[in-house]
Image (spheres, helix red, strand yellow):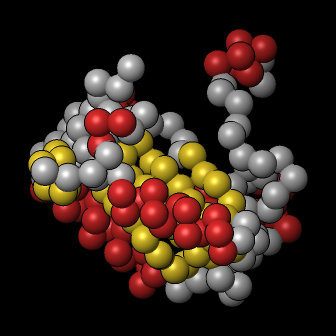
């Protein structure tokens, strides 16, 4: 990799010492490129999804049937991002030695693989529906849920998010 290529690559937001294929509970946020409100609007504290938002909702709900080691807990789809809790259970596909040497950045069965699959499936369906301008922001944000108090706080945040939309840092008019 040249210095120019290295300078263009954004640094990872992942916890360097954590194996993201480890079973656990993860709070994730996935945003649209440029905070574009493709998914819907908030009216009187409730989310009204567009056809694109419905596709995203369907793909989110499908995660456990596509990847049996993945569970989903609370989630919300807002106009320009998705918040959700993903539960990785044991029994996910493990990377082989060959996989580990050829694709060191993304392990099969890992949180990153799940998110990439989700984003890819959504994008294919959205673009086939005629929305060629749709794009996700690069990457995603995650938080490893460490205990029950953390889980309760995050669930509350997810459930309250539509009512507090104007205060949300992803709101297009947020200061």
- Compared to residue 3, the image places residue 31 above or below, namely below
The quarter holding residue 25 reads bottom right
Residue at 66% x, 74% y is 148
Q: Is residue 70 left or right of residue 80?
A: right
Q: Is residue 27 left or right of residue 52?
A: right
- Compared to residue 85, the image places residue 135 above or below, namely above
- Compared to residue 120, the image places residue 74 above or below, namely below
Residue at 48% x, 66% y is 155
Q: State the image coordinates of residue 159 (x, y, percent, origin top left).
A: 37, 63
Q: Nearer the viewer, residue 86 or 33?
A: 86
The quarter holding residue 22 reads bottom right
Q: State the image coordinates of residue 40 (x, y, percent, origin top left).
A: 17, 48
Q: Nearer the viewer, residue 63 or 76?
A: 76
Rendered-image quadrant of the C terminus: top left
Q: State the image coordinates of residue 90 (x, y, percent, origin top left).
A: 70, 85
Residue 116 in sight: no
Residue at 42% x, 59% y is 158
Residue at 23% x, 38% y is 37
Rendered-image quadrant of the N terminus: top right
Q: Nearer the viewer, residue 160 or 30?
A: 160
Q: Is residue 30 left or right of residue 79?
A: right
User: How many numbered circles does the render carry?
Assistant: 0
Residue 16 in sight: yes
């Amino acid at each position: 990799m040249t210095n120019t290529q290295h300078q263009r690559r954004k640094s990872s937001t992942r916890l360097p010492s954590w194996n993201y294929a480890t079973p656990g509970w993860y709070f994730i946020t996935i945003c649209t490129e440029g905070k574009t409100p493709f998914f819907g609007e908030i009216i009187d504290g409730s989310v009204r999804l567009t056809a694109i938002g419905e596709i995203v909702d369907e793909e989110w709900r499908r995660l456990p049937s596509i990847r049996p080691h993945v569970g989903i807990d609370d989630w919300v789809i807002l106009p320009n991002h998705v918040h959700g809790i993903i539960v990785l259970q044991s029994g996910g596909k493990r990377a082989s030695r060959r996989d580990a040497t050829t694709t060191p950045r993304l392990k099969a069965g890992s949180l990153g693989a799940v998110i990439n699959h989700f984003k890819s499936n959504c994008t294919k369906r959205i673009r086939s529906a005629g929305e060629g301008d749709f794009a996700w922001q690069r990457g995603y944000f995650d938080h490893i849920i460490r205990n029950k108090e953390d889980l309760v706080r995050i669930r509350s945040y997810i459930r309250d998010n539509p009512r507090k939309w104007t205060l949300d840092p992803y709101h297009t008019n947020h200061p």
